[in-house]
Amino acid sequence: MSGVYTEVTDATFAQEVLNAKEPVIVDFWAAWCGPCLKMAPVFEALAVEYQGKVRFAKMDTDANKQTPGTYGIQGIPTMIIFYGGREAARIVGYVARDEFKRRLDAALGALA
């Protein structure tokens, strides 16, 4: 686990994500996925930048099958923003930092 994000599992997803008081963005990823590995530094940098505003979490889709299936994850990386126990926005595939930030800001603005 990194200091800037939480690693969640099928067992901890409801408590860590769905029951969270603040928005949570979950990165569904796998170790063999090239775009996931390319996305990781962007995700971690924004986790630092948005600390205190959004909780960042990662879920390994190889080790956790139930939650990705529940949310229809078909391609990775997929980042889903959850708020109030529900999906608020989704980003699929690798996106550059500026685009990721723009989409995150738009989603957070819609939640305000």
Image: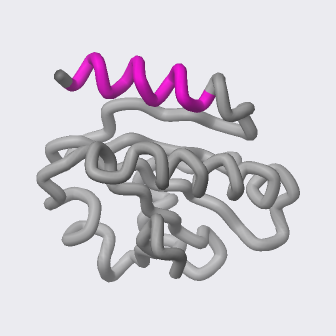
**Span shown in magenta:** 100-111
In the image, residue 77 lies at what x, y percent? 67, 50
Query: Magenta part mainly helix, strand or loop?
Result: helix
Would you say residue 93 sits in the magenta stretch? no
Q: Residue at left 69%, top 47%?
A: 75
Query: Closest to the observer: 50 or 92?
Result: 50
Q: Is residue 95 left or right of residue 109?
A: right
In the image, residue 65 lies at what x, y percent? 53, 72
Q: Where on the picture, by quarter, is residue 30?
A: bottom right
Q: Residue at left 33%, top 82%?
A: 11
Query: Closest to the observer: 67 or 44?
Result: 44
Q: Residue at left 60%, top 68%?
A: 61
Q: Is residue 111 left or right of residue 104?
A: left
Image quarter of the C terminus: top left
Q: Is residue 76 above or below residue 2?
A: above
Query: Closest to the observer: 64 or 21?
Result: 21
Would you say residue 101 sits in the magenta stretch? yes
Q: Residue at left 70%, top 55%?
A: 41
